[in-house]
Amino acid sequence: MQRKQRKNMGIVIGIDVGISTTKIVGLRDGRVVSPIRITAADQVTSLYGAFGKYLHDNKISLQDVEQVMLTGVGAAYINEPVYGIPTKKVDEFVADGLGARFESGLDKAIVVSMGTGTSFVQCDGDNIRHIGGLGIGGGTLQGLARVMLNTRDWKQIQSLAMKGDISNINLRIGDISTHPLPGLPMEATASLFSKAQYNAKQEDIALGIIVMVLQTIGSAAILAALNSGIKDFVLIGNLTLVPQCKEIYPMLEKLYGVHFHIPKYSEFCTAIGAALSANAI
């Protein structure tokens, strides 16, 4: 499948302005240049802070920037050219699809964007469309950690989870049956959090929260693909960096005969897609 090529030599900047973080990448000659992420108190501060840091760190002058492409929920707060540079907005779901397609090399897949919540975008060549979403994501993980662990610090949550034992939290098929059920191995989850006790260890709770969020997203993605013939899922967004992804999604692959892909720049795919969309606008 042929892609449109830009003849201009300037760099195109893609910026994904999210609820909590802003991600920014440059695209030059079809290559991704030094993606970064910035967290700030509000979206406008985050965007301009990320833009300034990106130019400084990469020794890029304003004159080198050909176009700025904005996407994400925070893009609605920006109604003027960024530093006088031609600036356009891109539909976030289109950016998800373009970025995931570019990074994975797959033309037909469902993109699972795991941010504060989760969205599903179906890609079939140039046909990119939003097919649904799930109110579970990184925001759920942090919210439950605040309530159950009295923390929202990701490093602390992850440190606890690395020492947790999921068999103390989740009910598995092996807990309720002496033999595997049709299509369900003994280690498959029968019920999330069903074995949790009043005195459950923080380490086990932390792992249980992470597993619940990641497994629910994976199962919902597979259900979203029913009757589509699609067996490939491209995971993008901040949650792809969670180490437990490397355990949970291979198990789902084996169970359902599908493939989950996590691209190199998975957390920056939406910003990459925004930059790529400059070809079509």
Image (cartoon, helix red, strand yellow):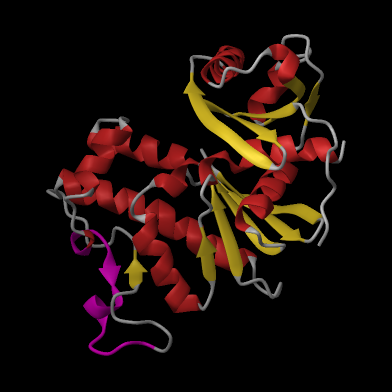
> Where is the C terminus found, in terms of image quarters?
top right
Q: Nearer the viewer, residue 140 or 26?
A: 26
Q: Residue at x 26, y 46 (%)?
A: 206
Q: Position of residue 110 (x, y in %)?
A: 65, 60
Residue 114 falls left or right of residue 125: left
Task: Specify the farthest residue to the top.
Answer: 83
Q: Nearer the viewer, residue 119 or 82?
A: 82
Compared to residue 65, the image places residue 140 above or below, namely below
Residue 89 falls left or right of residue 158: right
Compared to residue 175, the image places residue 142 above or below, namely above
Q: Nearer the viewer, residue 163 or 220?
A: 163
Q: Is residue 177 magenta?
A: yes
Q: Is residue 135 magenta?
A: no
Q: Nearer the viewer, residue 96 or 179?
A: 96
Q: Position of residue 198 (x, y in %)?
A: 16, 49
Bounds of the magenta segment: 167-181
Q: Residue at x 17, y 54 (%)?
A: 197
> How many badges with numbers are in the image?
0
Residue 125 falls left or right of residue 216: right
Q: Position of residue 34 (x, y in %)?
A: 54, 32
Q: Residue at x 69, y 75 (%)?
A: 229
Compared to residue 73, the image places residue 224 above or below, namely below
Q: Residue at x 16, y 50 (%)?
A: 163
Is any part of residue 120 visible from this angle?
A: no
- The image quadrant of residue 273 is top right
Compared to residue 85, the image places residue 191 above or below, namely below
Residue 145 falls left or right of residue 119: left
> Where is the N terminus found, in terms of image quarters?
bottom right
Is any part of residue 279 visible from this angle?
A: yes
- The image quadrant of residue 145 is top left
Q: Position of residue 265 (x, y in %)?
A: 53, 44
